[in-house]
Image (cartoon, rainbow, N blue to C red):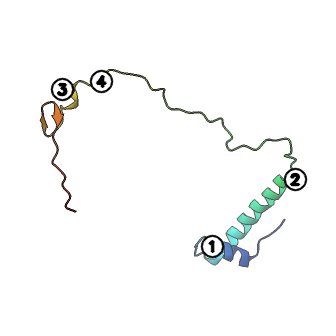
Amino acid sequence: MTKLSLAEVEAIAELARLDLSEAEKTMFQDQLSAILDYVETLDELDTEQIPPMTSAVPLYNVMRADETQPALPVEAALANAPDQAENQFRVKPILEDR
């Protein structure tokens, strides 16, 4: 079992911008060492015949197909408009002085 030193845990904590207590450093020393040991066991597996993948589940496009639908009636579109005239939305003009 490869065990990280406290100095290595402190360096990792500094990179992560974490201020750890001595108890936390000891706890993370054990946990990070266990993770590295597990990764070492995974390195022993023969993965030559396994193709690389980006996801463990198949991905597909979940968007619906474009379909032509009847337009919204003008009265319904303008029903909540604060200001309207001649079947159009009325807005305040935006004038920029350059």
Q: Nearest the camera: 89 or 52? A: 89
Q: Which quadrant of the rendered structure holds the C terminus? A: bottom left
The mark that comes first in sequence, 2 or 4, is: 2
Residue 91, quarter of the rendered image: top left
- How far across and down, in percent of the image, does residue 22 sit? 64, 77
Q: Which residue is mark 4?
A: 71
Q: Name the kind of residue labelled 1 in the image.
A: Leu
Cα separation, mark 1 vs mark 4, equals 56 Å
Single out the mark in the foreground, 2 or 4.
4
The mark that comes first in sequence, 3 or 2, is: 2
Q: Are marks 1 and 3 in contact (CB under 8 Å)?
A: no
SS type, badge 4:
loop
Residue 27, quarter of the rendered image: bottom right
Residue 94 badge: none
Position of residue 39 relative to residue 8, above or below, is above
User: What residue sits 30% from the left and 24% below the top?
Assistant: 71
Q: Name the kind of residue labelled 4 in the image.
A: Ala
Q: Are marks 1 and 4 in contact (CB under 8 Å)?
A: no
User: What residue sits 72% from the left and 65% below the top?
Assistant: 32
Q: Which quadrant of the rendered structure holds the N terminus? A: bottom right
Cα separation, mark 3 vs mark 2, equals 70 Å
Q: Which residue is mark 1?
A: 15
Cα separation, mark 3 vs mark 4, equals 11 Å
Q: Residues within 10 Å of mark 2 (few under 14, many from 20)?
A: few
The mark that comes first in sequence, 2 or 1, is: 1
User: What residue sits 70% from the left and 73% below the top?
Assistant: 9
- How far across and down, in percent of the image, does residue 46 sit? 88, 47
Q: Which residue is mark 2?
A: 44
- How far across and down, in percent of the image, does residue 97 sit? 19, 61
SS type, badge 3:
helix
Q: How many marks?
A: 4
